[in-house]
Image (cartoon, rainbow, N blue to C red):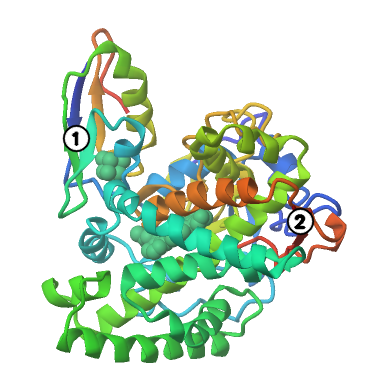
Amino acid sequence: MDIRVDRTRCLGAGMCALTAPQVFDQDEDDGLVLLLDAHPPQDRHTAVRTAAGICPASAITLTEPGSPPHP
Amino acid sequence: MHHEPSPHAPADEPVTLPTQRAAGCPFDPPAGLAELREERPLARMRYPDGHLGWLATGYSAVRSVLADPRFSSRYELLHLPFPGGPEGPPPPAVVGDMTGMDAPEHTRLRRLLAGKFTVRRMRRLTERVEEITAEHLDAMERRGPGVDLVEAFARPLPALVICELLGVPYADRERFQGHAHALMSRESTPEEVMAAYAGLQEYMAELVAAQRAAPSDDLLGDLARDSDLSDDELAGLGGFLLAAGLDTTANMLAHGTFALLTTPGRADALRADPELAPRAVEELMRYLTIAHTTVRSALEDVELEGRTIRAGDSVTLSLEAANRDPGRFPDPDVLDPHRTATGHLGFGHGIHQCLGQQLARVELTVALPALLGRFPTLRLAVPAEDIPLRTHMNIYGVHRLPVTWDEV
Ligand code: HEM
Ligand code: SF4
């Protein structure tokens, strides 16, 4: 799994940091997303997919082997 | 664009927005929304002012509109879905009211504030929220059984928290709570709404002047010190933040308690396992959806679920209907604190998704289990039918919640 975040879209709602705290954090100053781990281990993939799915700004893109980028 | 009606095209008879909750169902969305969602998740709707627009009740339709920048939130472009409102389009958002703005103006304010409301910053408030909660529970215990939970717990708690966060003296609450109430009531006339805004603005302007002179360590002081906000913007934003955090959290606390106490086994489930709180809170947000309805206006023609929404059409988004969509949440009408309600639209979605949601989560996850834990025999003091419901308010909930318990 390959994760990309778009800080120009992010609006700091924090859903990612709440859902997958080992993978996403929020910058202390601007509140925008920080990607802690662009290639997280398998056991975090479900949480990462949830985070990408609920991000209100569609700022998280995932590429998984054998699948087109989503969301 | 030319459209061939499909043989299965839903009846195009415009509907009106259902607003009456069925008697005896204080937690369910107004009757008729479920049928609409099933038959026509995106329906034509006749607005009270005569406008022919849309009503979205299905989860995917509601979420799509919220996420789509081709839909505007600017008040002056909206037709209002509730009867009894003012004639003609609403006035534009006052300075600092982010919910009525579009990008890029909205982005500027949101960016200024995002860093102040992060998950981490809000969690740091946990201890303070615990203290404030315990103080109110102590006071309830001292008064003895028989209190109105709204007045004794649900209203003061978020008011204290938001005052501390912003740096607003809690002693001034009489001055701003009345204004905040008028802003949130659908029964306020436009004049009353404007007067409430003016009152709040005047109050905040005094605070801002003081903050500019000697900035505090609180949020208002932070903004006064570092940002390029004008005094008007700072006062407007401050007033908006203050108002946005009061009624919402208060009603989640009171209505949430009402639901937990009257749905068999739910309060005990939370007492038995406080770790359940974060999940239970998400589920209560979904199940109750007290911020039940919002509106957007199409800036250009948009194809959605096989229909064409024309530029200028208003779309009413029933967040409460979407959060009960069985296609998204199995057995949606069951309050199940064990379910994963993540993805609910109780805080909205898209660029306006609630800025204060992480604060609200902290408040609710601390306060609800603490209340239930402190009073193991907590129950309504009057029959459930006698609880006065906020039927004509933009934020649903209860006006009063008389509760009692056995003294030990
Ligand atoms: C459980 C309590 C709360 C609920 C149910 C709630 C609900 C919502 C909803 C549904 C929206 C989106 C409105 C729309 O798109 O039309 C929103 C926006 C907002 N909320 Fe909350 N809210 C809560 C607590 C708070 C708190 C504690 C604050 C504290 C400051 C707050 C501040 C805001 C602000 C500033 C916005 C506008 C964000 C923007 O336009 O970018 N809310 N809220
Ligand atoms: S969920 Fe999306 S908008 Fe919110 S902080 Fe994460 S990336 Fe940003």
Give coordinates of residue B397: x percent, y percent.
66, 60
Give coordinates of residue B316: x percent, y percent.
56, 56
| Beta carbon at label 1 within 8 Å of ligand 2 | yes
Residue B49 marker: none
Give coordinates of residue B135: x percent, y percent.
52, 64
Q: Nearer the viewer, mark 2 or mark 1?
A: 2
| Chain for disc number 2 | B
Residue A5 marker: 1
User: Mark 2 near mark 1, Cβ–Cβ under 8 Å?
Assistant: no
Q: Does A27 sit above or below residue B115?
A: above
Say which residue appears at 54% left-offset and 43% top-offset.
B281
To which quarter of the image does residue A62 belong? top left
Location of the N terminus of chain B by quadrant is top left
Instruction: From the viewer's side, name the closer residue of B81 and B330.
Output: B330
Instruction: From the viewer's side, name the closer residue of B145 and B361.
Output: B145
Q: Residue placed farthest to the front in the image?
A: B408
Instruction: From the viewer's side, name the closer residue of B328 and B388.
Output: B388
| Beta carbon at label 2 within 8 Å of ligand 1 | no
Residue tagged by mark 2? Answer: B407
**Amino acid tagged 1:** Val
